[in-house]
Structure formats: structure tokens, C-alpha cells
Amino acid sequence: MIQFNYEIDYKLEDEKDTVAWISNCIQSYGFTEGEINYILCDDEYLLKLNIEFLGHDTLTDIISFDYTLGKLISGDIFISVERVLENALNLNQSFENELNRVMIHGILHYCGFKDKSDDEKATMRAEEDKCLKLIIS
């Protein structure tokens, strides 16, 4: 089950379609959907988590905690809406597109994709693009 939790004054326009899209992406990689919680928050909220759990005193757009067991994907995905908005402006992308990219980025990590090396980053970007093409509109 995919759930959205809001720690800020923002709400997705159509959670139902977003859930269907994410579920479709998960299935396309041969995984099963478990308990996935998206927590949409601000920079301050995510910075505290970044410092407390990862020891990084930097702003980020996403932090994911992976509880996946085998092919059952589960986890908590924290997303700073402020960071996503700024990144969208800097990348000349719509906010919605950038938010969708970040949401699926966390799922792709749970599917085993990494993004440490340049090759891994290129693969991750290609997989994000593939999933973005599956968006139900």
C-alpha cells in the first residue's frame, strides 16, 4: 500500500493516479508493492533527518529508508517539496515532473539501482525517464 503523508501545506492533486503509476512501475521491475510511505515535507524537516540519520549537514531533495525484503518493496521516502521546487526551476522543468522524478527515484533505489558513480547515475536517469513515460494522465 502506498500512502502519502504531509508535513507541510501541500497536497498532491490526484493521489489515486500517482499511486497507480508508482504501482505500475514497481510491477514493471518484477517487484511487489509492500508498505510505502511518502512523507512530503520542507527543507528544515528533511535537514534534521539528514543530520540525525546520515550525519550530513546539507539540504537534499530526498531521503529514503529501505525496508525491502526480497521482491517486496517497502520503505519510507521523505521528500522536501521546497528542494524539488528549487531544482525544477534550476533545471527548467515543471514542478510536477521533478516531483514525479524524485518520487520514482526512491522506488528505483529499492529495486536495486544505485547512483554513486557516473555510470550508475546515467542508468538511474534512464530508468527514471522510462518510468516517467508510464505516468497515467
Image (cartoon, helix red, strand yellow):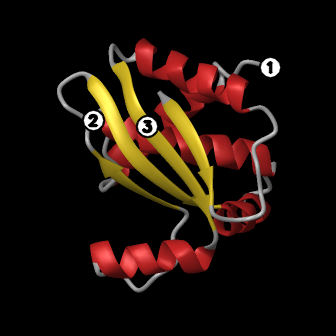
Q: As displayed, is residue 68 above or below residue 137? A: below
Earlier sequence position, callout 1 versus callout 2: 2
On the rendered image, what quadrant is the C terminus found in?
top right
- In front: label 1 or label 2: 1
Q: Is residue 1 visible?
A: yes
Dot 1: few (<14), some (14–19), or many (≥20) neighbours within 10 Å? Answer: few
Q: As displayed, is residue 27 above or below residue 101? A: above
Where does label 3 land, which residue?
A: 36
Q: Check disc 1 and give the amino acid type.
A: Ser
Dot 3: few (<14), some (14–19), or many (≥20) neighbours within 10 Å? Answer: many
Asked which secondary structure carries label 2, the reply is: loop
Q: Which mark is on residue 137?
A: 1
Q: Position of residue 99 (x, y in %)?
A: 67, 48
Earlier sequence position, callout 3 versus callout 2: 3
Which residue ends up furthest to the bottom in the rendered image? 57
Q: CA distance from mark 1 to mark 2?
A: 27 Å
Camera-side residue: 73 or 137? 73
Are the residues flagged by discs 3 and 2 in contact, CB closer than 8 Å?
no
Quadrant in the picture for residue 31: top left
Q: CA distance from mark 1 to mark 3?
A: 22 Å
- In front: label 3 or label 2: 3
Earlier sequence position, callout 1 versus callout 3: 3
Which residue ends up furthest to the left in the rendered image? 70
Are the residues flagged by discs 1 and 2 in contact, CB closer than 8 Å?
no
Q: Position of residue 83 (x, y in %)?
A: 65, 67
Asked which secondary structure carries label 1, the reply is: loop
Q: CA distance from mark 3 to mark 2?
A: 16 Å
Q: As displayed, is residue 41 above or below residue 74? A: below
Where does label 2 land, which residue?
A: 112
Camera-side residue: 112 or 116? 112
Dot 2: few (<14), some (14–19), or many (≥20) neighbours within 10 Å? Answer: few
